[in-house]
Amino acid sequence: MDDAYSVQQTIDGGYIAAGSTNSFGSGYKDFWLVKTDPNGEMQWNKTYGGIYDDIAYSVQQIADGYIVCGYTGSFGAGYEDFWLVKTDSNGNAVWNKTYGGENSDYAYFVQQTSDNGYILAGSTYSSSTEFDIWLVKTDSSGNMQWNKTYGGSLDEEAYTVRQTSDGGYIITGFTDSFSDNRDIWIIKTDSSGNVEWSQTYGGTREDEAYAVQQTSDGGYIIAGTTYSFGPSWDPNFWLIRLAGLHDIGVQNVVPHKTVVGKGYSVFINITFKNWGESEETFDFTVYANTTNIGTQHLTLAEGNSITVTFTWNTSGFAKGNYTISAYAEPVMGETDTEDNRKEDGWVVVAVPGDFVGQGYPIYAPPDGKVDFNDQMCFVDAFFAKYGIPPPPGVNPANCDLTGQGYPPLSAPDGTITLDDQMCFVDAFFAQYGITPPW
């Protein structure tokens, strides 16, 4: 009996097929690799194996030959082990590696990864009392870099794995542990094999998936069989389309000052995360209480986060307390919008130079006057840059009033200097009718 399980068109227009044969080779069944021309005429074939069953389930052409995986009963540590064979362009074995424990481990799919290593998926009986999905990552020479198992108290197997556009992996197969019967199981992992999400699909009878591909919109297309659905009591072909995940979130809203003089500007750091599986372009709006203080446009790659600095000029705003929030407009296809808005900061717009209220160094909110309490607060903010902590509740950035070269007034420069002291003195006398230089 000779069986083929995997085929791919090669760069010369021909085909490469992998499976098993007991017509040729040295054992009961051997890996069998067959290369044809574009018309299917055999150009060469190779067998690989020992005295027991060795079956190939997946083959992929790579730059300098072919990579083939399956299982071997002839070599390795257990009854059957994952077997990975690297050949040259003529099918001659260059190296081979086995992976497994003392029991049975079956590899069903291999793909070359973006770092020129390989990712293999299948099942293992060596790690538990039932079969679990087993994911193995190797370097370009087949040396194992890491491995992960996924499963429960019953059987699970994986038939396909693909590297995704974010560098992670999508795995498909079946689960008995997390279903009423046997269901399709889809697992999405990060680049290290850690589960990001998983989902089951099925009905009251047995359902399995054998192939998965990522689609152009970041979603997935899955093919398998179902006994649960369709017109026949026998298995039916089942094609499942999963939409790409689209999810933008606002993670942090952090003003660099908690108190600002009326007419001065505040820098607000806003962190966004694209939790989705494709690049997104969206608008975000910043609010002081319910007042829109500006909208910007942002493009963010899949899986990435970014912190944007937004400038709020308080001219025209009344003195008082303001809650600062940010809102990201939902992108097309986004269903989880709970994290699109975040209120995470507050700012007091006060008389310039009014940092605290009465009774300092016990912190109290600004009281509308520039006095000795504010002067003491300023001194503590100045010495904070030398490692002397200010009293609780004091944000030294509040006392950064201007940049270098005062006067004239300029944007704060992130440090407390003599320029800020002179600006504070002018703010003090302004409450007595002496016009400041700004």
Image: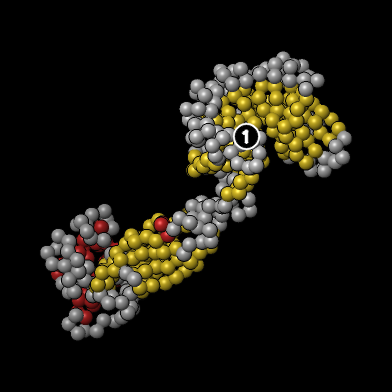
Q: Position of residue 332 (x, y in %)?
A: 53, 61
SS of the residue under disc 1: strand
- Quadrant of residue 411 within the rendered picture: bottom left
Rendering colour mode: secondary structure
Q: Residues within 10 Å of mark 1 (few under 14, many from 20)?
A: many
Quick check: 289 left or right of 67? left
* Amino acid at circle 1: Tyr
Q: Position of residue 291 (x, y in %)?
A: 35, 73
Query: Where the N terminus falls, by quadrant?
Result: top right
Does the image show residue 137? no
Which residue is nearer to you in this view: 49 or 398?
A: 49
Which residue is nearer to you in this view: 382 or 132?
A: 132
Q: What residue lies at 37% left-to-right and 69% top-to-bottom?
A: 287
Q: Position of residue 182 (x, y in %)?
A: 55, 33
Quick check: 276 left or right of 8? left
Q: Residue furthest left?
A: 359
Query: Where the C terminus falls, by quadrant?
Result: bottom left
Looking at the image, residue 263 lies above or below residue 180? below
Q: Position of residue 384 (x, y in %)?
A: 25, 58
Looking at the image, residue 417 lies above or below residue 21? below
Q: What residue lies at 18% left-to-right and 74% top-to-bottom?
A: 368
Does the image show residue 80? yes
Q: What residue lies at 48% left-to-right and 56% top-to-bottom?
A: 335
Q: Which residue is disc 1 drawn over?
A: 159
